Image: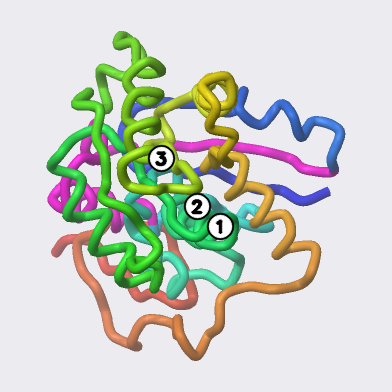
Amino acid sequence: MVHIRLITPHINDRSDKLKELEVFRDLPIELSMVHLNCGPSSIESEFDEALAAPYVVGRAIEAEQDRVDAVMIDCMGDPGLDAAREAVSIPVLGPGETSLHLAAMLGHRFCFVTVLERIRPMIEKRARIYGVADKMTPVRVIDVPVLDIQEAEVTEKLVSESIEAITRDRADVIVPGCTGFVGVADELAARLRRAGHPVPVINPIRATVMTAFSLVRTGLSHSPLTYPGPPDKPVRGYDLPKSPKLQIEGDK
């Protein structure tokens, strides 16, 4: 059995997202999910990511202490991803990085369709960091804040923007750019097929969990040469779990 933990990098309980993973119920995968006790209520800016990152690291340390096999950060911005990899030895994956690399494998060009215009610079920067910017078409947005996704009709907007990406920008693959788009990927793919556009639509949560499962089963994790442990020096004031890799002091 492979235990994979999803870390939601904000203060809202989004355990409803686990229903995206019911398709894997016959596989030897155990799933758990946690969120943050303090931090932002959603991730829609670099500021939000900076607030969340230390506590994402803390949840990753907890996961390793709980003998979890791998961790997924439940946000397409991958907040705290590199820092968490430095803090633990188990695989830590972000759905943004995973989905972008997978999209680059599945087609010549892909489109990232996300929530807000303000997210676009963040995604473009990550695409450059991840080395896939030359395969990404212009980012498209549906103008729905993360906290309003469940109340808005996002599928219609995603279909419209995806068709524009395919017909105007020559996208071959679609990446729904928010893990809050629960239950949307399958419907989006079906709607695009009916419209004459049978392109791959990546479900970020499913793709990342299965990548984590594969890494564990093949005995792979991130390289300690790329992600060495933090420098041996004290850090003060953060409420993080005890870890042999970190020296966290309380406030004095």
Q: Residues within 10 Å of mark 1 (few under 14, many from 20)?
A: some
Residue with the mark numbered 3: 166
Asked if residue 58 is positioned above or below residue 223 in the image, the reply reads above
Q: Is residue 177 visible?
A: no
Residue in view at x 48 percent, y 24 percent: 182
- Decide if residue 186 is on the left or right side of residue 86: right
The amino acid at mark 2 is: Ser
The amino acid at mark 3 is: Ile
Residue in view at x 36 percent, y 45 percent: 112
Residue with the mark numbered 2: 99
Task: Please give the label number shown on residue 102.
Answer: 1
Give the extent of the magenta segment.
28-56
Asked whether the residues under the numbered discs 2 and 3 touch, taking CB atoms below 8 Å apart as contact, a structural biologist would say no
SS for dot 3: helix
- Decide if residue 209 is on the left or right side of residue 132: right
Colour scheme shown: rainbow
Residue in view at x 42 percent, y 37 percent: 176
Question: Looking at the picture, how far across and down is residue 44, in whole percent?
Answer: 20, 40
Asked whether the residues under the numbered discs 2 and 1 touch, taking CB atoms below 8 Å apart as contact, a structural biologist would say yes
**Quadrant location of the C terminus in the rendered image:** bottom left
Question: Looking at the picture, how far across and down is residue 88, in whole percent?
Answer: 52, 69
Which comes sooner in the sequence, label 2 or label 3? 2
